[in-house]
Image: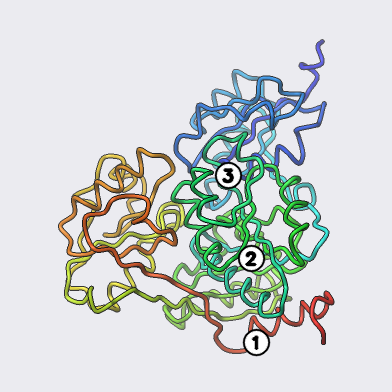
Amino acid sequence: MSISERRTRLLIMGAAGRDFHNFNRVYRDDPASEVVAFTAAQIPDIAGRHYPAALAGPLYPEGIPIVEEAELESLCQTSRIDRVVFSYSDVPHSEVMHAASIVLAQGADFILLGPKRTMLKAAVPVIACCAVRTGCGKSQTTRWLSERLKAHGLKAAVIRHPMPYGDLEKQAVQRFASRADLDAADCTVEEREEYEPHLALGNTVFAGIDYAEIVPRAEREADIILWDGGNNDFPFVRPDLLIVLADPLRPGHETAYHPGEAVLRMADIVLIGKTNSAAEADVRRVADSARRLNPRAPILRGASVVQLDQPEKVAGKRVLVVEDGPTLTHGGMAYGAGYVAAMEAGAGEIVDPRAFAAEEIAGLYRRYPHIGKVLPAVGYHPRQLKALRETINAAPADAVITATPCDLAALIAIDKPVFRAGYEFAEMGKPSLSGLIDRFLRDKNLISA
């Protein structure tokens, strides 16, 4: 029997993020394990590629293939898979167990790797900002946190949950301090949505694939690390303070998604965002749910304040609304801040983009039928970005409101006036997030009592 045959044969189910991190942390250097393939979901154009040998290590001189998740059952059969590791997030509990059922029916194990095996330890304190779902307001809260730390004279490095959708080898370790860095890295719309607002505040952002290399580089530049989590995943870096956002516009979701429920149970602080836009009954429902799951964590309220450039130029006009893409797609929202801004500004008509959608965009509407008459900003690859431009320019609108955090008009040529809608975190009520953050900083001797 060869060494290869004695190794446990694994598949890692992922979406170009948590899957790579789990491999790097647990399996890359393990001679008893052989990762046969990654499967890909959620993100287009990831399947058909390889996790490169330079990142996979000496046990994988040919790299590791990345295949469509649709091949899961056949791969379990043909590749004699012993174990499947589920490694992506923002997934309904039922879908996780459907995947488990496919795997178990083929005789293989189905496992989830937890924080103890996958979190890295930083040499400086870490505040992590996570959420129970995509689109809860985590990024704006992280930006608010960065400003709070600066007010105390602290240097924070932001480490972002991975979005490696390009040349994986070149994206092993990334540092962004300017928009020129984003251009040089050929960042997608989805990456720019997360990075540009931080850069506008003067924050340095670290991201990539190999977080064992990323974390030491970040901590050399900072007094404290801010983990800006993606989807509803738990952090890759062990937090000293874990803030978890829940969304009263989606009550019940806090207990219905993986690993959002686990993250909520882990929280040191639960922050219910968007309370200025939600019904009080839904805010209370989410608060009661959080209290049942995590009775030790204080439950705070926050607002998401939407601001629109030149609202007077939108009043009475036909408006096309472009929203943050992931919030609408696997985030499950029908609309976002752009639609709210259009309504508040008195737009005369919201133009339904579905009638004018290029085929690449029309496919998204078919896949995510819950999306309302707004346009998700997608640009994982040039073909999608071209389709986005064509859809916007084909729509008979007087103006475009774009609520994607990146400067979309700087990436594509739009033939209509463009007005940007932004949204920022604001504190509401007591206890306050600022008070709890300051207490944490005092406990860590980062500020004086």
Q: Residues under labels 2 and 3: Cα distance?
A: 27 Å
Q: Residues under labels 2 and 1: Cα distance?
A: 18 Å
Q: Position of residue 151 (x, y in %)?
A: 66, 80
Depth check: 311 or 283 in front?
311
Residue 246 vertical placement versus 439 (above, below): above
Q: Residue at x 60, y 44 (%)?
A: 17
Q: Position of residue 361 (x, y in %)?
A: 30, 45
Q: How many C-alpha atoms fall within 10 Å of the one at disc 2: few (<14), some, or many (≥20)?
A: many
Question: Residue tagged by mark 3?
Answer: 97
Question: Residue tagged by mark 2?
Answer: 129
Tag 3: residue type? Met
Depth check: 173 or 23 in front?
173
Q: How many C-alpha atoms fall within 10 Å of the one at disc 1: few (<14), some, or many (≥20)?
A: few
Q: Residues under labels 3 and 1: Cα distance?
A: 38 Å
Q: Secondary structure at mark 1?
A: loop
Left or right? Give the position of 362 relative to 283: left
Of the numbered discs 2 and 1, the one sitting upstream in the chain is: 2
Question: Residue tagged by mark 1?
Answer: 431
Left or right? Give the position of 432 relative to 396: right
Q: Secondary structure at mark 2?
A: strand
Residue 421 vertical placement versus 77 (above, below): below
Foreground mark, 2 or 3?
A: 2
Tag 2: residue type? Cys
Residue occupying the far top of the picture:
1
Q: Residue at x 83, y 59 (%)?
A: 123
Left or right? Give the position of 175 relative to 409: right
Of the numbered discs 3 and 1, the one sitting upstream in the chain is: 3
